[in-house]
Image (spheres, rainbow, N blue to C red):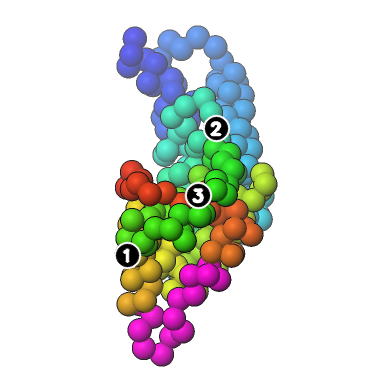
Amino acid sequence: MKADQQAFVDALLGRGAAPAGLTGSQRGLAAYRNNIQALSAQALAVPFARLREELGEDEFASLAWTFWRVHPPESGDLGRWGGMLAGFLVERAGEASGLPDLARLDWALHQAERAEDAALDAESLALLGSHAPDTLWLQLRPGVSLLAQTEGAVLVWRQGWRGQSQALADLDAVFVRAVLDGVNLAEALEAAAVKGSGAETDFDFAAWLQAALQNAWLQGVRATPPNRTTTSS
């Protein structure tokens, strides 16, 4: 029975012939397959709108169907399907194609839009004036991530209900990556200072903080270390 079920799934996904004795016509099987094929393109287009625009509708639909057959959804929430697409594109098209970077950006923006809502803890900002930097940790809002793209670092976040992105200067990227890695403020500042030694301008924490407040990157300042869960990539 289990083998028959797997054979049916394989036939449905175009991986093999229908099992002998399967009730229903080949026309019915083809109809099911066409429905799933259309669903794959519709579902993947939600998080990967920029990739779809780059490839065109027909090529994107072909990609979606191939990806579905190799990495089918693991849950009924199709909004969670697509996290492996960048790696899939590396194997199929290579990094030089630019498609994996585009997929990474699309997925990060999608994740940011699905992230938990969190308001700024404005009162916690007072800790910056009363505590030493090595006793403080910055907490960025859910959905904030840092991408290492071919053209440089890109910060992704949610403002309102829309995903946003912008390129970061090297020192800002070093600082944000340190914050996302869960180090204290003093260590994050030191990392940016070491990177900036030489001809580069020193990292301007005051300017970064102003941007973090204006763009809703920062959730608050904490006097206890967070769980070290890296969200950079």
Residue 46 locus on image (x, y percent) = 63, 42
Residue 151 locus on image (x, y percent) = 49, 72
3D distance between C-alphas at marks 2 and 3 = 37 Å
What's drawn in magenta, residue-wise?
195-208
Residue 205 locus on image (x, y percent) = 48, 70
Image-based side of 62 in relation to 10, left or right: right
3D distance between C-alphas at marks 3 and 1 = 19 Å
Q: In this rendering, which labeled residue sits more in front, label 2 or label 1?
A: 1
Residue 128 locus on image (x, y percent) = 46, 59
Q: Give me the residue at 33% from left, 13% from top.
A: 2
| Residue marked by disc 2 | 78
Q: Residues within 10 Å of mark 3 (few under 14, many from 20)?
A: some
| Residue marked by disc 3 | 124
Q: Amino acid at mark 3?
A: Ser
Q: Residues within 10 Å of mark 1 (few under 14, many from 20)?
A: some
| Quarter of the picture holding the N terminus | top left
Q: Main secondary structure of the magenta part?
A: loop
Res 187 → quadrant? bottom left
Image-based side of 137 in relation to 165, left or right: left
| Residue marked by disc 1 | 187
3D distance between C-alphas at marks 2 and 1 = 39 Å
Q: Amino acid at mark 1?
A: Glu
Give the mark, 2 or 3, whose residue is nearer the N terminus. 2
Q: Is residue 227 visible?
A: yes
Q: 93 and 222: which one is in front? A: 222
Give the mark, 3 or 1, whose residue is nearer the N terminus. 3
Q: Give me the residue at 67% from left, 47% from top.
A: 160
Q: Give me the residue at 53% from left, 70% from top.
A: 206
